[in-house]
Image (cartoon, coloured by chain):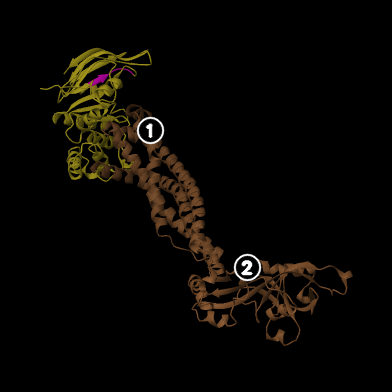
Amino acid sequence: MKTVARVENVSRTFGRHGEVTALDNVSLEVNPGQILALEGPSGSGKSTLLNILGLLDRPTHGRYWLNGDATDRLNSRDRARRRAHVLGFVFQAFHLLPTKNVIDNVVVGAAYQRLPRRTRYQLALELLDELGLSHRLTAMPATLSGGELQRTAIARAVVGEKRLLLCDEPTGNLDTSSTQLVIAVLRRMTDRGIAVVVATHDPVVSSHADRVVRLVDGQPSSGAHR
Amino acid sequence: MKRLVEASGEALWGVLARPKQLLGAGLAAGLGIALFVATWTVSVTAQRQVADTFDALRATEVRVLGTRTDDSTAWVPSDYDSRLRQLPAVVAVEHLVDFGEEIVSDSSPDRPDLGPGLTARIWSVDLNGPKAMRAVVEGGHLDDAASQMHTRMVLIGGRLAAEMGIDVADGVRAIWIGESPFVVRGLIRDAPLRPELLDAVVVLHQDALAIGLSPTAAELVIETAAGGANSVATQAPLAIRPESPNELTAVAPPDPGQFRRRIEDDTRVALLAVSGIAVLVGAMALSNAIALSVIARTPEIGLRRALGARSLDVFATVIAEATIIGLIGGIVGSSLGIAGAIGVAAWLGWNPIAVPLAPVLGTGAGVVIGVIAGVLPGIRATRIEPVAALRSSG
């Protein structure tokens, strides 16, 4: 099984002289079909690691391979292309476009994959049907429940041929039942061969992960396989 | 091309999603363009109006003069009127003779104690004159009725009359040219083609000769129909003196085209200045509105970057949005500009002149303004970091 993402001795510091260390010598692998949970208190480096995995940020030290390709020499254009084709993002605050309906929001996820318009809508329809939102295609975000919002956001993140789904506190704004629904959806994504990395404070989410990495002060403190 | 179409589609969606912003930014750009179109249309209307006025005055007068120094006055044949009236476009002809300056007084030379009199130029005309110089005469002309009074009559220029204290309301007044008495028949109140008549005395030819005045120069003043001056100027010497037309010179009015071009040059400079300011103001206002839009859409731009949008995609979307607003502003502004120009023309009593190119260029200017206005906000949008943008809105 080919590793989707691999980081090796990755560090990330901030400040002109690197005064703040957000990540310190982290190494890990993310495999297809797995849910990897990143646990840790606020400021432990979870989001920083997600940003590096999502090619939104670059490590100060260390290396990162995505789909087997070293990313340290990728230019801005190549990084954008990989974000469009390989990576998907889910945020705690959903970040749906408030003036677009459900299906149009999902189609935005495929906007930069250079797919024909008809194909984009076809993929979005199939995905929304799979996630149980086919009856809400034309609903506006303001009318959706928390669970529906996050499922729409997940559909937007994985539409197309995405390989790695990066979720930053995806259940942070959800109640218990919606949390269970979102976890089920994430599991369904792994069934499609997608690797999922979840930064979370929620022990319920961690309990459903295949592997948990706990970060403390930017360093992994333990790992567990289920 | 496909990306451009997609960027335009996204931009159009973005504009329609914020109609208030559209209204404000479009209005800002549109006002500049309205000023541009209105200025252009009004200036063209003004050019035509001024030129028409000029043409009406100047383009209908031809002066014929003798060129031989030994024959400065006798070259005018007695049947000049019938000869010239054979030419098409001739409306009236005046035989004007200059008798030089004489002492003119409103009291008899026998009473030098009443004043020394004034020096004024004496002109003579034919019976019923002046009739071809658009002179406005108050009182009576030197017509048949005047000649039947067996009294020599004069017309006095309005300025000279004021200087001498003469008014037609005074009733019958007499003046003396040298030692010869004349009755004041009327006052020349206005002479737009010959303002020197306002300081002169006009008498009949035979009266000038009868009192011993010597002519110094003569000319024929021909009033023509509009547009006929140049052809009359060409034909008049031949009609008056067919055997030697070269001994006469006909002075045509100045070319109205030159006058019009000069006005056009002047107004074009003003137009460019006003348009430049309008374009600048419109671009600044629109750029400001687009910059605010970019700030408001920072999370969305960050999200799109996270979803794989390149810097060029973001830039193209902002430019497309600004261009669409500029286009709408151009169409609205052109319409407002034309309406404003028609209103101004109607207020001034002018006939508005349609300038088909103005709304086309106005709309084009809107597009150009949009593109220019979108550049800086577009560059700023490409610098938005997705991480920071998403965090700030979370």
Magenta range is A37-41
Which chain gets the yellow colouring? Answer: A
Point out the residue furthest to the left here. Answer: A1
Question: Which residue is label 2 attached to?
Answer: B192
Would you call the spot at circle 1 few (<14 residues within 10 Å), some (14-19), or many (20 or more)?
A: some
Task: Answer above or below: position of B169 versus A111.
Answer: below
Q: Secondary structure at mark 1?
A: helix
Q: Residue at x 26, y 22 (%)?
A: A52
Query: Picture quarter containing residue A170?
Result: top left
The amino acid marked with disc number 1 is Arg
Q: How many marks?
A: 2
Chain for disc number 1: B
Q: Which mark is residue B380?
A: 1
Asked where in the image residue A100 lies, by quadrant, the reply is top left
Q: Are marks 1 and 2 on the same chain?
A: yes
Residue A159, how many percent across, how many down? Answer: 20, 36
**Residue sitting at the far front:** B70
User: Which chain can be seen in brown?
Assistant: B
Quadrant where the image shows the C terminus of chain A: top left
Q: Is residue B239 left or right of residue B190?
A: left
Locate the N terminus of chain A and report the quarter of the image it occupies: top left
